[in-house]
């Protein structure tokens, strides 16, 4: 997290008075330290955040009148510079830009350039309490996990924060309900409270104190200091009773089937304006742009939104196909699953999503209708320390190409960063070619100096990959994600259930089970595919069978007369299990429906749900917990998965639209 | 097909006990079935029953593998299910006047206990203990097949 | 979308049906890249730029304009046979365009109003998008099309990948650009929420509500948006006009228009 160096308590409590006509001195003093100043200014009928040259650019005397779907500016009778509340811009525009070039790939040299961020120093003027809370939330998102976002860190560290206490609120504000305001409690370099005639000023950091020292200030009178406190307190009164938010996360989880989701989705036009306006939403996608000469391409990261119809698509399906699934993702993420991911609420109560919704949907009304209050539950505030590095590409060489089926091919990659050879079965890599978006692919096999990726050509990148020739280079990030907990099957019956191309992420596991077979009570592989032609790794299947270390049973859904093997769905094979199923540890991967049928079959045979491990597929853009695409309820499939213990997924395993 | 007269019923009962279908039956029913039927051997590729023929016999597969095939226009014969040891085939012979739903072919050399439909039906009518023991097993076998067909229709691999 | 060979330049043809030529002009407008394009592609049929004609087959055929006359139907079918990749460009070709307005007008009266000798003109009763007649491999939407999207399509063809043309609301581009919403802050009418992106929020950038020229995006909730426009006090004729504008023949705009027409009586 980004915090300013501490100031002694006494110094922090010290107050000054700055007359309104001297506000320009503050802007000048900050600009004098070489910082650009970003602050509120009137443009296009609203108060937006943009570059400020002098105090004259500030919205003195303007008031905003906000309600669901409506924002209007009015002249006030006084000349307050900060007499408005939050507008359409949020500070994330400057810490997390809407469009950001993140890499350039050159075809000839096969280089992936990932530019190091260089950010000139800047000051944010007029940051409100809810906005400071929002910056802290994005700190946890981008800097608090295993992987971090260097660009965000650079922009965030470069910002000097001049906070302003709210002295009025809009009908859309609900910071008191989210416990983020109205008063600013920290996270600033300088704090201003506007009163008649000027500002009560406090410093929050040595840098802030240095600026304050340059201003034409005096000590505030008793009345002035009192007015500052009253002005902030009046906002709390103005906002009225806080909403009953206690336990909202759990309350929402109980309401996933509420009919109201479908009703609100009928109104919602899925414009995504709520997520784009929200100061904490962090989802992005990458797009590739190739130059006409075909020699290089750039990768740009863009703000994305879970309201996008393609947001959760994978080859052959969409995990959130219905508008109600997408609305539910938004609301439950903000108020419920954010807690699971980041230990806090995803909402700070700024009200932007209410004001800027063109069809006037108010999240407060939806929450009240969908998840009315129940007995409060306390949530622990757990923030993990910053660790590790963000994923950077390393180059690998394609050693060989083996077709597996009509549409699936295994690529062997060598000249690898050693980290890949130390990966574990179940993990995946993000693989990129210049000009193509990176895609997640499981490691199907670990060899002495190589890893295998088995890829089904379903779209542009996968098709380009399977068409490569030996010697070609690819960019790799990883290994990423969780792996199969092999030790948990020691002394038990290890059962691997694979469907179709699902054998690929299990191949490395089977290799490990075979190599260590005497540690298990028994080892078996049940492999089903649609037809004999769809089977992967036919040579390996034969070799495993011959090894006698594993029982390999193969079945197909249908076949021509030349097939002499089993025909029937893979769950039929469970009838062969004669052991005590409470002693089974199962590993299951396949297409969604096959996994559901298999898991049901295993449970009905008596396999405990904490002994069933599955690997989930979700749409992934980053693979490192930053882009938001792979969310499944409170989890990021890329970081918390793809391998999950079934009972950890709860009823999320086969719920529609999550 | 090669039929063997089996007067060693104990051997047949032992074979039945090796299958899930047979092992769950009561000893009396096992013996009754062993006496009703005969053990038959089939060679690889031997056709046991043609689609559309009258269903005259029910079998319990002891060893080997059979394929249930059906003719799909423009694709020729397609195997829709394999019969594994312990599975039954020709179960419609339990009912009078029915036709075989698919062609039954041995995919490898196989052995089965085969029972004439007429005899089986007569025995079921008169021996209530046999009926009470056999019908649930047949139902279970049919239910398994239905469940498998439903999953197949869903196309597990469609995603 | 592979090209016909490593050395040969892809052969590109541009064909025109009922339209204003605006989209073809967009191609000519790509001044900076035009030389590069000509050196990378063999442009063999281009009524606006050259009179050179040569027979198919072509690697890419760009089709501009709607299918509005009986002879168009055979022509487009023939073109399809000659084209490896057929790309429709502009609102006319992708959605029927402005001509599609006549789909709701009394045909004879409409024709009489435009032409002095209606009896000479053989025209179809409707102006329809190309995709109603032949398979279309890719679409470039808009009236006119966006030069950036055109470049992306061309470079993607050269690289051999699918063009990255997103289908998101115009609002999303508007928000990324930091434009203050005209609807919320200005009470203007705007089709942004239901219209697909690609223009980089051109109209809102110039303080004008989106006219919907890129057409409906996948799953656009046109019903809710028309209800909201009516609720904010706009007369049904105005809402009708907003949806009918450029791409009214495309669903779900078409249903909204028909519905509004019915309620008008
Ligand atoms: C953890 C994990 C492991 C995987 N392992 C393998 C593997 O071992 N072998 C294999 O063949 N496939 C694997 N996949 C799926 C593979 O990533 C997608 O098929 C691939 O991204 C499609 O990209 P494309 O450019 O070829 O397709 P596109 O042309 O982009 O699109 C085809 C379809 O794929 C979807 N898609 C696009 N990008 C992604 C993405 N980044 N993530 C998921 N879906 C996407 C699209 O929505 C579309 O429906 C894995 C996915 C995950 C999440
Ligand atoms: S969810 Fe709405 S109110 Fe909450 S922080 Fe985001 S924009 Fe503000
Ligand atoms: S998934 Fe969450 S963070 Fe991402 S856009 Fe939706 S609500 Fe915002
Ligand atoms: S702003 Fe309103 S209409 Fe748009 S996506 Fe959000 S809730 Fe839906
Ligand atoms: S101005 Fe139009 S396009 Fe822009 S956000 Fe508002 S409704 Fe959407
Ligand atoms: S804003 Fe709307 S009308 Fe304007 S160019 Fe874009 S899609 Fe067309
Ligand atoms: S958060 Fe980006 S793929 Fe998981």
Image (cartoon, helix red, strand yellow):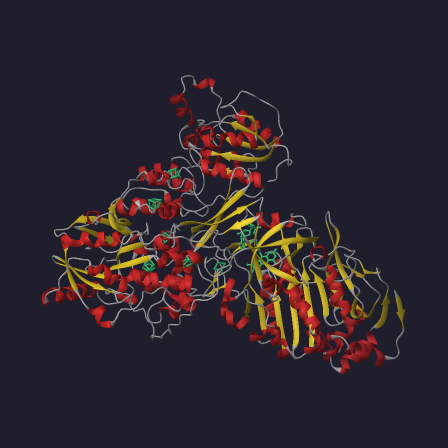
Residue A416 lies, in percent from the top left, at 62, 58
Q: How many marks overall? A: 0
Q: Is residue A551 above or below residue B27?
A: above
> Is residue B65 among what the camera can see?
yes
> Is residue A605 among what the camera can see?
no
Residue A356 lies, in percent from the top left, at 31, 52
Residue drawn 60% across the image and 76% down it: A488
Q: Is the N terminus of chain A in the top left, top right, bottom left or bottom right quadrant?
A: bottom left
Residue A476 lies, in percent from the top left, at 57, 56
Q: Which one is in front, A165 or C207?
A: A165
Snapshot quadrant of residue A513? bottom right
Residue drawn 72% across the image and 48% down it: B73
Q: Which one is in front, A444 or A360?
A: A444
Q: Which one is in front, A468 or C100?
A: A468
Residue A492 lies, in percent from the top left, at 65, 78
The image quadrant in which ligand 5 is located: top left
Q: Is residue C233 above or below residue A450?
A: above
Left-right relation of C175 to A632 = left
Left-right relation of A316 to B144 = left
Residue drawn 31% across the image and 63% down it: A133
Snapshot quadrant of residue A337? bottom left
Snapshot quadrant of residue B125? bottom right
Q: Residue furthest bottom?
A: B27
Q: Which one is in front, A237 or A594?
A: A237
């Amino acid at each position: 997290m980004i915090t300013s160096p501490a100031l002694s308590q006494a110094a922090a409590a010290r107050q000054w008075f700055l007359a309104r006509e001297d506000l320009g001195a503050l802007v000048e003093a900050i600009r004098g330290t070489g910082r650009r100043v970003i602050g509120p200014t009137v443009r296009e009928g609203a108060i937006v955040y943009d570059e400020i040259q002098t105090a004259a650019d500030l919205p003195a005397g303007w008031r905003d009148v906000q309600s669901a779907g409506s924002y209007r500016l009015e002249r006030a009778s006084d000349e307050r510079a900060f007499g408005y509340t939050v507008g359409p811009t949020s500070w994330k525009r400057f810490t997390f830009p809407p469009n950001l070039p993140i890499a350039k790939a050159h075809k000839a040299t096969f280089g992936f350039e990932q530019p190091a961020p260089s950010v000139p120093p800047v000051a944010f003027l007029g940051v409100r309490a809810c906005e400071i809370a929002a910056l802290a939330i994005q700190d946890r998102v981008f800097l608090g996990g295993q992987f971090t976002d260097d660009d965000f860190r650079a922009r965030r560290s470069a910002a000097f924060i001049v906070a302003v206490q709210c002295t009025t609120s809009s009908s859309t504000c609900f910071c008191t309900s989210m416990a983020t305001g109205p008063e600013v409690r920290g996270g600033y370099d300088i704090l201003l409270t506007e009163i008649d005639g000027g500002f009560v000023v406090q410093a929050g950091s040595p840098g802030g104190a240095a600026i304050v020292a340059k201003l034409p200030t005096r000590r505030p009178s008793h009345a002035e200091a009192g007015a500052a406190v009253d002005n902030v307190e009046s906002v709390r009164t103005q906002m009225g009773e806080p909403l009953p938010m206690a336990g909202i996360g759990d309350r929402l989880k109980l309401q996933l089937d509420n009919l109201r989701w479908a009703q609100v989705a009928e109104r919602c036009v899925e414009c995504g304006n709520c997520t784009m306006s929200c100061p904490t939403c962090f989802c992005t996608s990458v797009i590739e742009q190739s130059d006409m000469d075909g020699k290089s391409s750039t990768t740009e990261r863009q703000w994305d939104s879970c309201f996008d119809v393609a947001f959760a698509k994978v080859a052959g399906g969409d995990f959130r196909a219905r508008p109600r699934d997408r609305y539910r993702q938004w609301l439950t993420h903000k108020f419920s699953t954010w807690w699971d991911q980041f230990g806090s609420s995803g909402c700070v109560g700024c009200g932007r999503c209410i004001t800027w919704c063109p069809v006037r949907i108010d999240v407060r009304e939806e929450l009240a209708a969908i998840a009315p209050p129940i007995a409060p539950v306390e949530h622990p505030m757990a923030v993990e320390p910053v660790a590790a590095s963000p994923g950077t590409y390393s180059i690998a060489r394609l050693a060989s190409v083996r077709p597996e089926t009509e549409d699936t091919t295994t690529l062997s990659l060598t000249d690898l960063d050693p980290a890949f050879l130390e990966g574990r079965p179940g993990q995946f890599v993000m693989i990129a070619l210049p000009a193509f978006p990176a895609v997640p692919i499981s490691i199907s096999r670990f060899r002495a100096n190589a890893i295998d990726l088995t890829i089904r050509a379903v779209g542009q990148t996968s098709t380009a990959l399977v068409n490569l020739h030996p010697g070609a280079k690819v960019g790799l990030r990883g290994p990423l994600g969780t792996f199969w907990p092999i030790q948990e099957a020691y002394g038990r019956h290890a059962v691997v259930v694979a469907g179709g191309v699902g054998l690929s992420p299990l191949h490395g596991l089977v290799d490990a089970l075979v190599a260590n077979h005497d540690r298990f009570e028994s080892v078996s592989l049940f492999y089903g595919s649609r037809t004999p032609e769809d089977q992967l790794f036919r040579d390996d299947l034969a070799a495993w069978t011959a090894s006698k270390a594993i029982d390999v049973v193969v079945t197909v859904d249908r076949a021509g007369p030349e097939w002499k093997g089993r025909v029937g769905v893979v769950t039929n094979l469970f009838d062969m299990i004669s052991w005590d199923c409470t002693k089974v540890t199962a590993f299951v991967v396949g297409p969604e429906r096959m996994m559901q049928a298999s898991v049901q079959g295993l449970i009905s045979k008596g396999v405990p749900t904490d002994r069933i491990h599955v690997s989930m597929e979700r749409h992934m853009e980053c693979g490192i917990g930053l882009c938001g695409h792979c969310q499944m309820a409170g989890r990021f499939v890329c970081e918390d998965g793809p391998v999950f213990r079934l009972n950890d997924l709860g009823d999320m395993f086969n719920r529609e639209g999550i | 097909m090669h039929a063997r007269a089996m007067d060693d019923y104990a051997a047949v009962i032992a074979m039945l006990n090796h299958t899930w279908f047979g092992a769950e039956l009561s000893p009396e029913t096992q013996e009754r079935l062993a006496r009703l039927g005969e053990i038959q051997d089939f060679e690889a590729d031997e056709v046991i029953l043609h689609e559309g023929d009258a269903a005259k016999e029910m079998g319990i597969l002891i060893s080997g593998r059979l394929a249930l095939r059906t003719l799909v226009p423009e694709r020729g014969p397609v195997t829709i299910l394999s019969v594994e040891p312990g599975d039954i085939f020709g179960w419609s012979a339990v009912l009078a006047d029915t036709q075989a739903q698919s062609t039954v072919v041995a995919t490898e050399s196989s052995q089965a206990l085969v029972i004439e439909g007429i005899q089986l039906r007569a025995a079921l009518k008169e021996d209530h203990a046999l009926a009470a023991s056999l019908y649930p097993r047949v139902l279970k076998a049919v239910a398994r097949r239905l469940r498998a067909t439903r999953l197949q229709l869903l196309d597990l691999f469609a995603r | 979308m592979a090209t016909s060979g490593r050395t040969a330049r892809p052969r590109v043809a541009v064909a025109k049906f009922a339209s204003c030529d605006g989209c073809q002009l967009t191609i000519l407008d790509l001044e900076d890249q035009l030389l590069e394009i000509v050196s990378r592609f063999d442009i063999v049929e281009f009524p606006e730029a050259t009179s050179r004609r040569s027979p198919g087959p072509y690697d890419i055929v760009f089709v501009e304009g709607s299918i509005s006359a009986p002879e168009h139907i055979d022509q487009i079918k023939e073109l399809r046979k000659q084209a490896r990749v057929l790309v429709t460009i502009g609102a006319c070709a992708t959605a029927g365009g402005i001509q599609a307005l006549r789909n709701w007008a009394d045909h004879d009266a409409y024709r009489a109003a435009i032409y002095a000798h209606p009896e000479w003109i053989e025209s179809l009763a409707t102006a329809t998008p190309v995709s109603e007649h032949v398979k279309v491999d890719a679409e470039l939407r808009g009236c006119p099309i966006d030069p950036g999207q055109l470049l992306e399509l061309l470079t993607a063809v050269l690289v051999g990948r699918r063009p990255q043309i997103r289908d998101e609301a115009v609002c999303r581009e508007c928000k990324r650009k930091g434009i203050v919403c005209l609807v919320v802050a200005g009470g203007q009418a705007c089709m942004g929420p239901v219209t697909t992106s690609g223009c980089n929020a051109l109209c809102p950038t110039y303080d004008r509500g989106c006219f919907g020229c890129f057409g409906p995006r996948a799953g656009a909730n046109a019903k809710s948006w028309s209800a909201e426009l009516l609720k904010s006090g706009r007369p049904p004729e105005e809402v009708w006009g907003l949806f009918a504008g450029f791409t009214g023949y495309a669903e779900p705009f078409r249903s909204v228009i028909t519905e509004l027409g019915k309620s008008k009586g």
